Image (tube, rainbow, N blue to C red):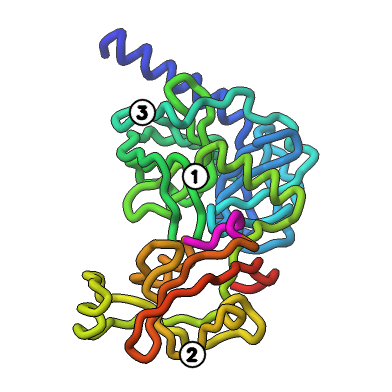
């Protein structure tokens, strides 16, 4: 083995060891676990999709102790769950600039299992997009995809750059292949909100929608290439859509200036920042295109 490879191997092992000192195993069942990162003293972040329940959560710390943790809040839109645990007192010491990552860069995903200790995987940054909003309404700036087959036990683990600094946490949730990095700025924003409010405010239109295909006549009248749209099947009384005059049978074709071709196009336009703001809505009623403004409300707590 060449000296360069030996030096690279040793550097990866050292970076793993440093990161592992701030990673925990998260377990809610008798068998199996995912990973979490001690983001701040007493605060652990993990992948929301891997957290099976809200109570009886336990962590395995780097020193091998199993301790209880409590749920501070969840944000499925970004796949982040925040846990509180006083014994998790050794947070990540260095954070890197996720914006500096480029396709071709190497990264480590470092997690922990409840029985075997630290685990790591070497990834290649395969895609970097300045910003991407997911179908769940979450926003990542930037969106960084990793070319790695992420083990279930590593979900929620730390993503470490080539300088040994944490740039986010790993999840397979929003990648068809491989995994993505939930960037550190997004994690910080979600942690701050969940610690303060226990939830992430999300926009709400008060309608039940179903995808449909537009007939040729409507496509021509709208001068629209996309055949897909969404029809209103239910309108909540006194909700935002009801107040805007939307009725059952209306067909939504654009929201906030963006075409509605699937339900995700609606949900992605409803982050917490648009609550109480009017959005332009274009719809079809009786074969005629119409426009209105709809003032977004906050989604009632507990609503999907």
Q: Is residue 247 visible?
A: yes
Between 181 and 252, the one nearer to me in the picture: 252
Q: CA distance from mark 1 to mark 3?
A: 17 Å
Nearest to the eye among marks 1 and 3: give it.
3
Residue at the disc numbered 1: 154
Residue at the disc numbered 2: 248
Q: CA distance from mark 1 to mark 2?
A: 45 Å
Is residue 138 rendered to the left or right of residue 296?
left
**247 lies above or below 19:** below
Is residue 52 rendered to the left or right of residue 281?
right
Badges 1 and 2: C-beta atoms under 8 Å apart? no
Could you tell me which secondary element the residue under label 3 belongs to? strand
Q: CA distance from mark 3 to mark 2?
A: 51 Å
Q: Quadrant of residue 10?
A: top left
The part of the chain drawn in magenta is 269-274
The N terminus sits in image quarter: top left
Residue occupying the point 69% across, 62% down: 54
Q: Which badge, 3 or 2, comes first in the chain's sequence?
A: 3
Q: Is residue 31 visible?
A: no
Q: Categorize mark 1 by other alpha carbons within 10 Å: few (<14), some (14-19), many (20+).
A: many
Magenta stretch holds residue 208: no
Q: Which badge, 1 or 3, comes first in the chain's sequence?
A: 3
Q: Which residue is farthest right?
A: 86
Magenta stretch holds residue 270: yes
**253 lies above or below 106:** below
Nearest to the eye among marks 3 and 2: give it.
2
Residue at the disc numbered 3: 106
Q: Which residue is farthest top?
A: 3
């Amino acid at each position: 083995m060449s000296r360069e490879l030996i030096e690279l191997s040793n550097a990866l092992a050292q970076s793993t060891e440093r990161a592992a000192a701030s990673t925990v195993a998260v377990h809610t069942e008798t068998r199996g676990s995912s990973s979490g990162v001690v983001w701040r003293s007493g605060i652990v972040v993990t992948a929301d999709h891997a957290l099976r329940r809200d109570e009886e959560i336990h962590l395995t710390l780097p020193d091998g102790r199993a301790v209880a943790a409590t749920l501070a809040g969840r944000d499925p839109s970004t796949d982040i769950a925040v846990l509180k645990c006083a014994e998790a007192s050794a947070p990540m010491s260095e954070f890197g600039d996720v914006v500096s990552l480029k396709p071709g860069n190497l990264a480590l995903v470092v997690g922990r299992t409840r029985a075997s200790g630290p685990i790591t995987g070497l990834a290649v940054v395969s895609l970097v997009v300045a910003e991407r909003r997911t179908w769940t309404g979450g926003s990542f700036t930037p969106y960084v995809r990793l070319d790695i087959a992420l083990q279930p036990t590593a979900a929620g683990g730390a993503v470490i750059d080539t300088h040994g600094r944490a740039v986010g946490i790993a999840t397979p949730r929003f990648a068809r292949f491989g995994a993505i990095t939930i960037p550190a700025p997004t994690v910080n924003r979600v942690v701050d909100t969940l610690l303060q409010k226990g939830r992430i405010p999300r926009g709400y239109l008060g309608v039940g929608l179903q995808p449909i295909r537009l007939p040729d006549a409507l496509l021509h009248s709208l001068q629209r290439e996309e055949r897909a749209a969404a029809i209103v099947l239910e309108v909540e009384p006194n909700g935002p859509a009801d107040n805007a005059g939307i009725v059952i049978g209306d067909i939504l074709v654009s929201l906030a200036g963006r075409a509605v071709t699937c339900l995700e196009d609606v949900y992605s336009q409803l982050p917490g920042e648009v609550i109480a703001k009017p959005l332009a809505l274009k719809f079809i009623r009786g074969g005629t295109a119409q426009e209105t403004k709809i003032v977004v409300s906050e989604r009632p707590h507990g609503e999907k």
